[in-house]
C-alpha cells in the first residue's frame, strides 16, 4: 500500500516537474507546479511529516501559487523564441543528467547505512504540529525570529521594487520612497501594488 | 519505502529544475524552476529527518519554505517592475543590469 502510494505520488511529482519546464504557456506551468506540490505533500505525509505537508498545501499550493497566477495574468503569457544559443536544447538535458548522476553517486558513495532502511519506528506524534511547534519555539526560537524579519524585509522590498513611481522618472527616483519625503501620494500609489502577500 | 528511493526522486526533481532553468527564457518560468529545486531540497531534508528519526529536519524544511516565499515575493516584484518599464521579459535580452 505504501509503495503504491509512493510510486503514484512520485509519478505525479515528476510529471508536474516535467510539465513546468515543458509547457509553452506560463499559466500551464503554474498549474503543473500546483500538481507537483500536491504530490509532494503526499510524499511528506508518507514520511510522517504531517505539519510540513499541511503547510505545503496551504502556504505553497495555496498562497504562493495564487501570487504566481496573479502575476501571470498581469504580465501576460507570451514567451519569445526558444534558443539563442545553438545546441542549447541538446546540451541542457545532458547537463541535467550529469547533475542527477553526480548527486546519485555522491549519495550512494556516502556509505550511510541507514539509507537502505525505512528509518526507526516513530510514535504517532512524530512531525505533528505540537512537536514541530515546540521545536520551533524552544530550540529554534532565534532562527524562527530571523525568518520573520526576513519575511518583513521581503515584503518591504517588493513594495519598493514594484513602486509605480519608478516608471518614466529617472532611476535616481528609486530610493526616494524610502527617505520619508513623499507623502500621501506615494502611499496611495503603493496601495495598488499587487505583490504584497 | 527505503530512504534511498526518496533521495533518488529528490535528485531527479532537482535535475529537472536545473534543466528548466537552462532551457527556458521567461523569468517567470525560471522562478518556477527555482521552486522545483527548492522543493527537491525539501524532500531530501524531510526524508533524511525520517531516516534519522529526528524532527529537526522538518523544521529546516519549514524554514526553506519561508525562504522560497521571500524569493517569490522579490522575484515577482522584479518581474512586475520589468514589465512596467516595458522591457522584454526574456533573460537573454535582460543581461545588462542598467535599465
Image (cartoon, coloured by chain):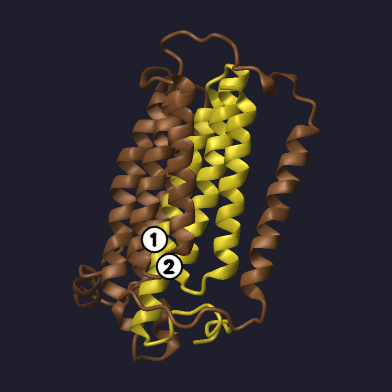
Chain colours: A brown, B yellow
Q: Which residue is mark 1?
A: A29
Closer mark to the observer between disc 2 and disc 1: 1
Residue B58 marker: none
Position of residue B71 measured from the top left corner of the image (x, y, whole percent): 46, 57
Gap between marks 2 and 1 measured at Cα: 10 Å
Q: Are marks 2 and 1 in contact (CB under 8 Å)?
A: yes
Residue at left offset 62%, top offset 52%? B15
Q: Secondary structure at mark 2?
A: helix
Position of residue A129 measured from the top left corner of the image (x, y, whole percent): 37, 22
Mark 1: few/some/many CA within 10 Å (<14, 14-19, 20+): many
The answer to which of B92 and A141 lies nearer the viewer is B92
Q: Tell me: residue A71, above or below residue A44.
A: below
Mark 2, chain letter?
B
Position of residue B93 measured from the top left corner of the image (x, y, whole percent): 53, 85
The answer to which quarter of the image holds residue B5 is top right
Residue at left offset 41%, top offset 46%? A36
Left or right side of A129 for A117: right
Mark 1, chain letter?
A
Q: Which residue is mark 2?
A: B28
Amino acid at each position: 500500500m505504501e509503495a503504491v502510494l509512493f510510486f503514484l505520488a512520485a509519478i505525479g511529482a515528476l510529471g508536474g516537474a516535467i510539465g513546468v519546464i515543458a509547457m509553452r504557456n506560463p499559466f500551464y506551468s503554474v498549474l503543473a507546479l500546483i500538481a507537483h506540490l500536491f504530490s509532494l505533500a503526499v510524499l511528506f505525509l508518507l514520511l510522517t511529516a504531517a505539519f510540513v505537508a499541511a503547510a505545503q498545501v496551504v502556504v505553497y499550493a495555496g498562497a504562493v501559487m495564487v501570487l504566481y497566477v496573479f502575476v501571470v495574468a498581469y504580465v501576460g503569457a507570451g514567451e519569445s523564441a526558444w534558443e539563442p544559443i545553438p545546441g542549447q536544447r541538446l546540451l541542457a538535458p545532458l547537463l541535467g543528467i550529469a547533475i542527477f548522476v553526480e548527486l546519485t553517486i555522491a549519495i550512494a558513495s556516502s556509505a550511510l547505512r541507514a539509507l537502505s532502511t525505512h528509518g526507526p519506528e516513530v510514535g504517532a506524534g512524530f512531525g505533528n504540529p505540537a512537536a514541530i511547534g515546540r521545536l520551533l519555539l524552544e530550540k529554534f526560537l532565534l532562527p524562527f525570529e530571523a525568518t520573520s524579519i526576513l519575511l518583513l524585509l521581503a515584503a518591504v522590498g517588493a513594495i519598493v521594487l514594484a513602486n509605480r513611481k519608478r516608471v518614466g522618472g529617472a532611476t535616481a527616483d528609486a530610493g526616494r520612497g524610502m527617505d520619508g519625503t513623499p507623502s500621501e501620494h506615494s502611499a496611495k500609489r503603493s496601495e495598488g501594488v499587487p505583490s504584497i502577500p | 519505502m527505503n530512504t534511498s528511493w526518496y533521495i533518488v526522486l529528490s535528485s531527479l526533481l532537482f535535475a529537472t529544475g536545473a534543466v528548466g532553468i537552462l532551457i527556458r527564457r521567461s523569468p517567470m518560468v525560471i522562478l518556477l524552476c527555482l521552486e522545483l529545486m527548492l522543493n527537491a531540497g525539501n524532500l531530501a531534508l524531510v526524508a533524511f529527518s525520517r531516516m534519522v528519526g529526528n524532527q529537526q529536519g522538518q523544521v529546516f524544511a519549514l524554514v526553506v519554505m519561508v525562504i522560497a516565499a521571500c524569493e517569490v515575493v522579490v522575484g515577482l516584484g522584479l518581474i512586475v517592475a520589468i514589465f512596467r518599464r516595458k522591457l522584454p521579459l526574456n533573460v537573454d535580452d535582460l543581461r545588462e543590469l542598467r535599465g
